[in-house]
Amino acid sequence: MQLNEKIDLLTDSVKEYIETNYELVKLQVIDHTSDVISALIGMLIFGILLFLFIIFGSVYAAFYLTDLIGIDNIGFAVVGGFYLLVAILFFFNRKKLIEDRVCNNFIKRKMAKEL
């Protein structure tokens, strides 16, 4: 083999390597994107169902408390006050409750995927 043939062979090998790496990166991006999208869709569906449960449960609790106490619409005020209290507690603890958990969950998924 002459030097020109070796250089051509090396050039072809480098081109093939670059194309293969490019395809690999594309497939990895598609894989990670599909993981994130599927997780988001699952959480969205769960969130919608949980939201509906909370709405109907709250209306039931409000009517039940109104009947139990005997004062018109007081059950709705009690349920509303409960949600206000939950919102205040959530606001002051949102970093610990949500942000840290989401970050940790994301890191776990990425580390498990790469192993």
Image (tube, grey):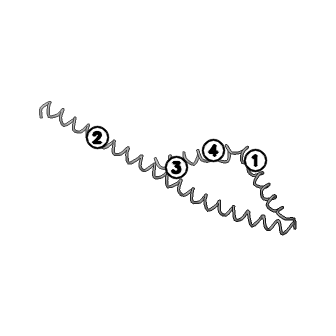
Residue 17 circle label:
2
Alpha carbon of mark 3 to alpha carbon of mark 1: how far? Answer: 31 Å
Contact between marks 2 and 1 (CB within 8 A): the answer is no
Query: The residue tagged with tag 4: helix, strand or loop?
Result: helix
Q: Position of residue 56 (x, y in %)?
A: 69, 65
**What's under tag 1, amino acid-wise?**
Ile
The residue pinned by badge 4 equals 99
Q: Residue at point 69% right, 62% down?
A: 55
Nearer mark to the viewer, of 3 and 4 = 4
Q: CA distance from mark 4 to mark 2?
A: 40 Å
Residue that mark 1 sits on: 88
- Residue bearing the label numbered 3: 109
Residue at 43 percent of width and 50 percent of height: 31
| Residue 40 circle label | none
Badge 2 amino acid: Tyr
* First reached walking from the N terminus: tag 2 or tag 1: 2
The answer to whether residue 99 is visible is: yes
Left or right, residue 27 beside residue 98 = left
Residue in the foreground of this view, choosing between 95 and 13: 95
Question: Callout 4, which amino acid?
Answer: Glu
Q: Nearer the viewer, mark 4 or mark 1?
A: 1
7 or 47, which lies in front?
47
State the SS at label 1: helix
Q: CA distance from mark 3 to mark 4?
A: 16 Å
Earlier residue among tags 3 and 4: 4
Q: Earlier in the sequence, mark 3 or mark 1?
A: 1
Q: Amino acid at mark 3?
A: Arg
Q: Identify the mark nearer the N-term, 4 or 2.
A: 2
Residue 114 lies, in percent from the top left, at 46, 47
